[in-house]
Amino acid sequence: MMHRAPANGDLDWASDGSGWPNAAHSRFERVGDLTWHVQEMGSGPVVLLVHGTGASTHSWAGLAPLLAARFRVIAPDLPGHGFTQLGSQAQSSLPGMASSTAALMNRLALTPVLAVGHSAGAAILARMCLDGAISPRALISLNGALLPLRGLAGQLFAPAAKLLAGFSLVPRLFSWRGADRRVAERLIRDTGSTLAPEMVDLYHRLIRAPGHVSGTLRMMANWDLEPLARQLHKIAPLLYLIACENDRTVPPTEARRLHRLLPQSHLVALAGLGHLGHEEAPGRFADLIFEIAEGHEIGV
């Protein structure tokens, strides 16, 4: 365990960790060439929470403590996100994120019985399952980005991100623009979610940090869901697809499309929430996860 963490771009735990959600449960772990920010709370069966692109452990601010009433909850910042160091180009790809997260769990000597991923985090967990790195009883996808983008957006997404990530000044330009809180407000509004002011403030802090922006752009530039999509039918854990009807980032039609491809999966639609639904209504998601756990006789 490390009690001091290196700064990730302009984010430094010594100063920016003050007031961070669930900071009392934070610690830093060195695994290979990465120093991870990890939050751990509760006791019982292990639940692994993996956030999406551009987020951090703050995304679980409300949900993690609720789950910790029954489970031992593990939530890391992904490489280049929040307070975890930016890794190599390879570590920013989907296989790289999956193998790095698997190495972290091995370092912690923990085996999750439930894996919960938001957006791109669901893809990371799916890759880990397919690679045999984890074998949870259930994989719970919260507005999961598990299928490649369709149409022109899918063709332009990675090339555009690669172009932006290739210029060293771009993260600083983004973070400079992000100094205006209205940028964070607009980004969140565009997801279809309505967050409490304190959650908006946390996203505002993140987009002002060039290191975090750089990690986000690098992840986007190296993302390829085609191999995962071809193998999803082989996934062993039961897959739960939780889709919010107001999601403007990963429309609920994508979860329905995946459910048609994987009829053995379970689809749950939630009205009135957007892409960050678990941040808007953590209690609703905690109840769903408890119900799934009980169905698998986990923690009962």
Image (tube, rainbow, N blue to C red):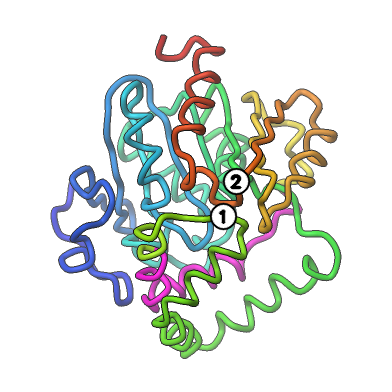
Q: Is residue 262 left or right of residue 282?
A: right
**For the residue marked with disc 2, what is the amino acid?**
Leu
Tell me if residue 16 comes above or below residue 137 in the rendering: below
Q: Is residue 251 left or right of residue 108?
A: right
Q: Point out which mark residue 273 bears.
A: 2
Q: Residue at x 41, y 63 (%)?
A: 200
Residue count near mark 2 (Cα–Cα under 10 Å), binned few <14, some 14–19, many ≥20: many
Residue 227: image location, x then y, percent:
74, 50
**For the residue marked with disc 1, what is the amino acid?**
Ser
Q: Are marks 1 and 2 in contact (CB under 8 Å)?
A: yes
Tell me if residue 65 comes above or below residue 197 in the rendering: above
Residue that label 1 marks = 193
Q: Quadrant of the C terminus?
A: top left
Q: Is residue 207 magenta?
A: yes
Q: Which residues are magenta?
A: 203-227
Q: Is residue 50 left or right of residue 250?
A: left
